[in-house]
Image: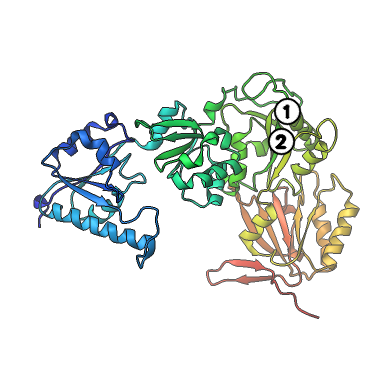
Amino acid sequence: MSEQQQGRLYGVGLGPGDPSLMTVRAVEVIAEADVIAYHSARHGRSIARAIAERYLRPEHIEERLVYPITTESTDHPGGYRGAMEEFYAEAAARLAAHLDAGRTVAVLAEGDPLFYGSYMHMHKRLAERYPTEVIPGVTSVSAAAARLGAPLVEGEEVLTVLPGTLPEEELTARLASADAAAVMKLGRTFPTVRRALERSGRLADARYVERATMGAERTAPLAEVDPATVPYFSVAVLPSRVGAAPATPDETHDTNEAEGTNEAGGADTAGPGEVVVVGLGPAGPLWLTPEARGELAAAGDLVGYTTYLNRVPVRPGQRRHASDNKVEAERAEFALELARRGRRVAVVSSGDPGVFAMATAVLEAASEDPYREVPVRVLPGMTAAHAAAARAGAPLGHDYAVVSLSDRLKPWEVIAERLRAAAAADLVLALYNPGSRSRVWQVGKARELLLEHRAPDTPVVMGRDVGGPEERIRIVRLADLDPAQVDMRTILLIGSSQTRTVRRGDGTEIVWTPRRYPED
């Protein structure tokens, strides 16, 4: 049959429920269509038909596409998925018969046809066979934000849209990292969604919108909603964080300036706030955990070494307090003082904050007066040793030790003793802080000590700027380790007697340490 003889398929977005929010184009298409199709449950009522009812004509052919199941169980041999696939195939065949007969078919869809809508199942089966047009509609997310009267996203914020049917752990992680979010498909999933919001620390900000723009509309703080009253047509919304507080000027504050104002520019609040020490990982946003991302977005104050603080996106309303890398104790006390005045503070740290980083400094200060009552949490991050090991293969596949070569906070004699002990125990070694402009001899001395226990051809992984724009991974022999090629952005992984290097078929060289240690 030629295209001219075929009917035309329309997916018609009706908007969130109020018929007056239908687009002019949607009304035109419904008026011109020969066939009006809509989905319904077995009770026969269709929300889509009810929205469009005023535009239906007696001569319209109505095709009611009745779901065989909704949330109940089924004895279909293919289970729920099999029953629904069979239904969609049968429904598409019914519409195809009209299209083959030259009739125009309008499939009604609440909200937008291609946004979690049932129409898309018809679209995937028919759009390649028949001329098709999709009429967009106002989504329930847009309607919910409008009814709340709260900005949804602003500036560089990202909106995350989630189905409530996701597993609780997945919901929690995504909500923790989201700037703003909307959770669809509530109903029976509401208790899971509520727990995920609570676990992610976002429950206090969450809003609930039921049947937005319809006659039975309801809005409320989500924490106050009775789960037994929640229908499927409801949305959980986390509005813009920017709209939560007035913006303050984007400026950098010296850590000696513990101003008596909060992040909104007002006076400090009574009682303690909180300090969260956040691990940024070794490089950019791909190495940041969802939990860490969420805490960075929620903080009123960010405190950290300038280089690390610059890796955190600037957000309106946050105050940024940058300082030099050698003032960890002062930085920790500054953060705790802010929290003691009622501020929510994130102390940023490269890698994992508990590995040669800021967590120790903060906890040490928090163990003394006047900061004993200030809540402190530590969020883990990808540490440099694990990042470099993954790039090289699996050199940390067996027992290993982690040692810092910096003698700024401990004498070299202690470092040398630990290197000898780890080498004698045949442990793989991860060497942090191997060198700097003011420390140029430690790598050479460490190499000499290790060669007393390790063969000259022991593999050494040199990882520089791992995950960053200047990343370089080199594999050298221990005897060939050149201190001149090592700086503070480099981490060294020294193999054990069992560590192997292998050149694979594509020419790449990998390093790995067997999990099984040979018996004597």
Establish if 297 lies above or below 502.
Answer: above
Q: Secondary structure at mark 2?
A: strand
The percent position of residue 225, horizontal first and vertical second, equals: 51, 36
Residue at screen point 62% across, 43% down: 292
Name the residue carrying label 1.
338
Circles 2 and 1 in contact, beta carbons < 8 Å: yes
- 475 shown above or below 319: below
Q: In percent of the image, x 18 and y 38: which residue is there?
A: 29
Quarter that holds the C terminus: bottom right
Badge 1 amino acid: Leu
Tag of residue 275:
2
Residue 46 drawn at (x, y percent): 28, 43
Mark 2 / mark 1, whichever is N-terminal: 2
Q: Judge by depth and name the residue closer to the eye, 187 or 253.
A: 187
Q: 237 and 399: which one is in front?
A: 237
In the rendered image, the residue lying farthest to the bottom is: 520
State the image quarter where residue 507 is shown.
bottom right
Q: Is residue 440 above or below residue 269?
A: below
